[in-house]
Image (spheres, rainbow, N blue to C red):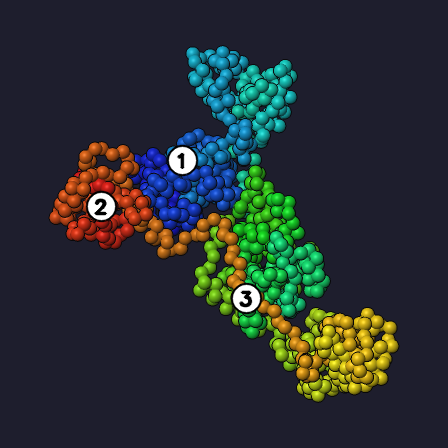
Amino acid sequence: MTPEERSRKDSSATGSGAAAPRSLAESLRARDDASLSALLRARPDLITPVPTDLTQLATRAATRASVVRALERLDRFAQQTAEALAVAGDPATYAELLGLMAGDGGAEGDPAVAEAFPRALATLREQALVWGDDERLRLVRTARELLAPSPQHPSPTGLGPTAAETTAGMSPGRIQELLTTAGLPTTHDAVSAVASLTALFTDRARMAALLETAPAESLEVLSRLVWGPPYGQVTPDPAARLRWLLDRGLLLPTAPGTVVLPREVALHLRSGRAHRHTEPLPPAVEAAATHRPQIVDATAAGQAYTALATIEELLKDWDEGGPSVLRAGGLSVRDLKRTAVALDVSEPVAAFWVELAYTAGLLASDGEADERYAATPAYDEWRELPAAERWTRLVTAWLDATRTPGLVGGRDAKDRTLSALGPGLDRSAAPEVRHRVLTLLAGLPEGASAAPESVLARLRWERPPRADRPTADDLRTRLAQWTLSEAELLGVTGRGALSAQGRALIGAPAPADHAPPAEAAGPGDKLPVHRQHHRPTPHVPLSAAEQGAAASRAARLLAPLLPEPLDHVLLQADLTAVAPGPLERPLADMLDVLADVESKGGATVYRFTPASVRRALDAGRTASDLHAFLAAHSRTPVPQPLAYLIDDVARKHGHLRVGAASAYVRCDDDALLNEILADKRSAALRLRRLAPTVLAAQTDPAALLEGLRALGLAPAAESAEGDVLITRAHAHRTPPRTAPEPVPEGPPPPDATLLTAALRAIRAGDLASTTPRKTTGAPTASGDLPRTTSAETLATVQAAVLTGESLWIGYVNAEGTASQRVIGPIRVEGGFVTAYDHTADEVRTYPLHRITGVAELADEG
């Protein structure tokens, strides 16, 4: 059942012989379970904790915090409807409220407003912001207080107070003077005088006749105030154009030197409209360009591969331990710059990749005394997954994350810089905005990219900005902009259009209306304008099973578009190797040791140098191993210069041996040791000869190794037993870490199980609190627990077992929480009563000593 249907059903409930509700609680009591479920789903804060009855639910729905939250989540037209009802009479009729929205012309004057108005009113009713039938519409008192105009809080409509409100403190004589000047007969009291003045202002014909006699300068003053703000300043001796208005009550004083345009006068000048610009329909999401879907998917797949490669490159760079953690948490500005240079991206993009790895649980701090960032054990598991599954893991984490990388470099409320991986980056609205932006893109024809401004305009209509919270509203706009750019970086979109794998990931169906394929629209091409359903679908997180199914489908769509890993490279005579695509992991890992990456892109270029070859030899490889490896994995013959380089470095490698004395150098060739001692560059090592084949150094072995390598030599480290030490990179990992949990924006929407249980408890609690009952003992105030003696309680319960009647009881549980219940006693024994509890809808056993009292239910009829 749609909200409009539920609204019509609720509003007609009192028109079929039932009395009109006198309160919000009575209005809720008349609803069916579907309508109450819709209310609790739209306003989940009302169910935390579960209300004891419908009266408590109504009270909670009217609290300021809950009403503010509900108003914030309305779309623009629903908000305008609530604002119009706040300046209407209390109560107002359906026709009166529609007139404020559409103007004097009514439905014929503005068909778009007339068509959208039932939906907006149904939304307000569904969310318990408006109650009553169509002849007595009432806005919840708290909402009226928030939206009604006052000098301290101007109305969003720009209207001021009514004539009756403004003249409340005016002297009766002055009011009579206003009547006389306006051409009205005087009355015997101020109340009837104000009523006569109000009748004039609300009579279109008489007001038109009065304004025809007004000076042009006076009409100009009214035109400046008509759309708000309605307040103006006057001097003690106002000019003639102002005096004419003041004498006739068209401007009324509110304070010394301040006047206001009465609401009735403003509405006449506005032709009955409460808003200058009524927005019944959302802005259309416009297509900026259209591409063939195959091109979009291929472009997105290429970017997805780049995203995976970037994350691997980042964590490979931090494999032996990354940057230190700041004392306040996070990454220093210097380390972020260094990471950006290493990844060859800008600093904001580097912050995004770092935060994404952290959000996905691939990166964390190690928690040691000298705390540093490093890859987690989950990273090693992630690397073993197929490429498409690795991508879905990243994108799923991004979609649901509340951490916002775009804030990095900004300032928090205490003017402290926000750092990557640091605190203060969580924004609870981020997941909702991301999902909504992608949903809007999914509504366009396949291959169509959206104009960013039209997406932002649509989001502003669905969640209008608040004048008193510009920072929060600006954040939502920035979140949408960041979503568009981050989705492109991740390969969720390609050329600005949602890819097939991105569409599958959010569970969006393929669009029914496909635009004709085109490579790209030219500047003069007329692009399609997409009008989606004007009611935004609230973001409801997918269940684990639904999310897993969506991720699997996205991975299946992406997998064929990703390049297959290669098992070969192309060796060239200039000591380089070209990898024409992604390499298989063992090959890539070995090349990372044997060569240095010279350039990246569609093809990766590796360069072999003496230092890189020596690195492979230090890792335990021999020259024959390297020759065999290159011959097995090259589609071209091994160039002679590369073979000579490997043999030359291998011949020198280990000729010198460095060990720990403090440190020493030994070599069978004493002539080579003489050359080292004679070289001025070795002075910093402070070497001296201990024997013809041994030099001692006043430095540690690692510094000695580096110093000798700087001289162009190829020393090898040896152990205390004289064996060559093999040095392999040590992969530093954190202890097992869990990914950061998103920070929710208020209570999550309740699932079907919780809703069913909550409705059953609320209905039963309402039955217990509203069922008529006979008085026993001293009368109790409404809402108090029944009070009877132990003997009376036992006798009444035993009698109910025999008669099969239900009882109203007061009960205090072990935690001391008191409640009212309606039970049907089944048996009494051993100090316990077993009964069917209407509140829990099940049979329960209660200790008699915890029952405060009982009362029989009143006879029906």
Write down the residue under mark 1.
137
Q: Nearer the viewer, mark 1 or mark 3?
A: 3
Question: Identity of the amino acid at label 2?
Answer: His
Question: Identity of the amino acid at label 1?
Answer: Leu
Lateral position of residue 743 relative to residue 721, left or right: left
Measure how far apart labels 1 and 2 are at the Cα level: 48 Å
Nearest the camera: 814 or 370?
370
Nearest the camera: 79 or 542?
542
Measure how far apart labels 1 and 3 are at the Cα level: 61 Å
Question: Tag 3 or tag 1, which sits nearer the N-term?
Answer: 1
Q: Position of residue 307 (x, y in %)?
A: 62, 66
Q: Position of residue 642 (x, y in %)?
A: 77, 83
Q: Nearer the viewer, mark 1 or mark 2?
A: 2
Lateral position of residue 532 relative to residue 835, left or right: right
Question: Identity of the amino acid at label 3?
Answer: Pro
Question: Tag 2 or tag 1, which sits nearer the N-term?
Answer: 1
Write down the residue under mark 3.
735
Q: Residues within 10 Å of mark 1 (few under 14, many from 20)?
A: many
Write down the residue under mark 2.
849
Lateral position of residue 421 relative to residue 87, left or right: right
